[in-house]
Image: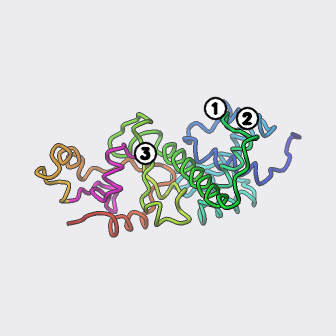
Amino acid sequence: MPHGAKWSRDESLVVLGLYCRTPFGQLHKSNHEIIALASRLGRTPAAVAMKACNFANLDPAQQARGITGLSNVSHGDRGLWKEFLADSDTIAEQIESVYSELFPQPDTQPDRAPIPTAQQSEYEQIIRARRLQGFFRRAVLATYNGACALTGLSIPSLLNASHIIPWAHAEGRRADPRNGICLNALHDRAFDRGLISFDEEFCLLVSPSAADPGVGGELSGFLTGYNGKRMSVPSRFAPDPMAMEYHRRNIFIAA
């Protein structure tokens, strides 16, 4: 691709996706994912890394830390960032769609029988849900550097991307990293069931119903042992305070 060629929307989408799924310190031209994406786009790794860092210039969390990309962020990138914040689900689905075209999965079967029209809508909903879930998990785990925000556990198979506002109630925010926290499997389930939450300072709250050893057994001690501990707040895509308030009011079992 000619040097300085204008970036297409699809190219910008996948680089935004790259920014979301890559820890900030790894946004450099030597990163193997950046090299692979650059190859598919016909761009240099340096150009892809530079554009990814430009999105940091638009990220308020990075601006607050004084860590920004280049100052000449394009009008298109500014518009795309605003779209992402306003409707993360739509943009995340578009990102995953372009990624799937650039990096088709090995199990893709182009010659499989066509899906009956009556089932097409259900099939499309399943594909969309999978794309949103995949994007959300990758973005949240990258945001928390692959470690539980509460315990620091860093075994990927034991980590979940927890929705603060539940999936069923978060239309438009199901893929929003600001609506997520990286938690280990046990605390994720406790958070989902309202047995724990976080206060305005992101310190752990434990429901009285889970704190009673007569009810929770050893689990009670495990949860209460972290009571009041402040979670590790990420440098970007920090939990949305309004989402956390929703969780405390509607999910957390306060009594």
Q: Nearer the viewer, mark 3 or mark 2?
A: 3
The mark nearer the N terminus, 3 or 2, is 2
Q: Is residue 8 left or right of residue 137?
A: right
Please state the total of marks drawn on the protein image.
Answer: 3
Secondary element type, mark 2: helix
Instruction: Give the Cα separation between the discs numbered 1 and 2.
Output: 8 Å
What residue is pinned by disc 2?
45
Which of the 4 image quadrants contains residue 29? top right
Which of the 4 image quadrants contains residue 118? bottom right
Could you say which is closer to the camera, residue 167 or residue 95? 167
The type of residue carrying mark 1 is: Asn
Q: Residue at x 36, y 49 (%)?
A: 188
Could you say which is closer to the camera, residue 219 or residue 1? 219
What residue is pinned by disc 1?
31
Question: Residue 39: where, in percent of width, then height?
Answer: 77, 34
Secondary element type, mark 3: strand
What residue is pinned by disc 3?
160
Which of the 4 image quadrants contains residue 209? bottom left
Instruction: Give the Cα separation between the discs numbered 1 and 3.
Output: 24 Å
The type of residue carrying mark 3 is: Asn
User: How crowded is the residue under tag 1: few (<14 C-alpha within 10 Å), some, or many (20+)?
Assistant: few
191 in magenta? yes
Q: Is residue 87 left or right of residue 183?
A: right
Instruction: Give the Cα separation between the discs numbered 3 and 2.
Output: 30 Å
Q: Residue at x 46, y 39 (%)?
A: 146
| Residue extent of the magenta highlight | 183-207
